[in-house]
Image (tube, helix red, strand yellow):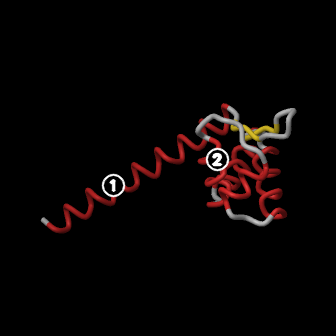
Amino acid sequence: MQEARDIEGLKVLGNETRLRILEILSDLREYTYSELKKATNLSSSLLAYHLKQLQRLGFIQKMPMGKYQITRSGYFAITKVFEIERRARGQEMSTMWVVRD
């Protein structure tokens, strides 16, 4: 069961829009729906869909006053995604240098 949840989590994180939402929320402050809508430039229905996907897996939570906040799991996930991205870019850079030399 955990493996299925992990796979679902990877699918959710494989979406650029959801990564952008997590990136915005990673500054550890709460955002209103309107603030997220403005920051992402998404339609209301599309933003609502992506927020539900992130909430469903526990990457974000909706606070009592209706604001959204990243969870520890969400922060950990986005940190790991950025780390992998940096490593991949570093790998590309080192490969480029090898090819040019």
Distance from the alpha carbon under mark 1 to that under mark 2: 25 Å
For label 1, the residue is 91
Q: Note whether 56 is above or below 37 in the view shown.
A: above
- Which residue: 58% across, 38% down? 27
Residue 66, image x, y percentages = 85, 40
Q: Position of residue 11 (x, y in %)?
A: 69, 55
**Foreground: 79 or 41?**
41
Q: Amino acid at mark 2?
A: Leu
**Residue 16: x percent and y percent?**
62, 60
Nearest to viewer (mark 1 / mark 2): 2
58, above or below 101, in the image:
above
Pointer 1 with pointer 2, Cβ within 8 A: no
90 left or right, relative to 82 = left
Determine the residue positioned at 33% across, 55% down.
Answer: 91
Q: Quadrant of residue 100?
A: bottom left
Task: Check disc 2 and report its element: helix, strand or loop.
Answer: helix
> From the image, which quarter does the N terminus lie in?
top right
Instruction: Report x, y in % for residue 63.
Output: 82, 34
Q: How many marks?
A: 2
Q: Secondary structure at mark 1?
A: helix
What is the crowding at mark 1: few (fewer than 14 residues within 10 Å), some, or many (at least 20)? few
Q: Nearer the viewer, residue 50 or 92?
A: 50
Residue 22: mark? 2
Residue displayed at 70% across by 58% down: 38
Report crowding for label 2: few under 14, some 14 to 19, many 20 or more residues within 10 A (C-alpha): many
- Asked if 62 appears above or below 41 in the picture, the reply is above
The amino acid at mark 1 is Gln
Image quarter of the C terminus? bottom left
Name which of mark 1 and mark 2 comes first in the sequence. Answer: 2
| Nearer to us in this view, 14 or 22 | 22
Which residue is more in the foreground, 71 or 94? 71
Residue depicted at 20% across the width and 61% down the height = 97
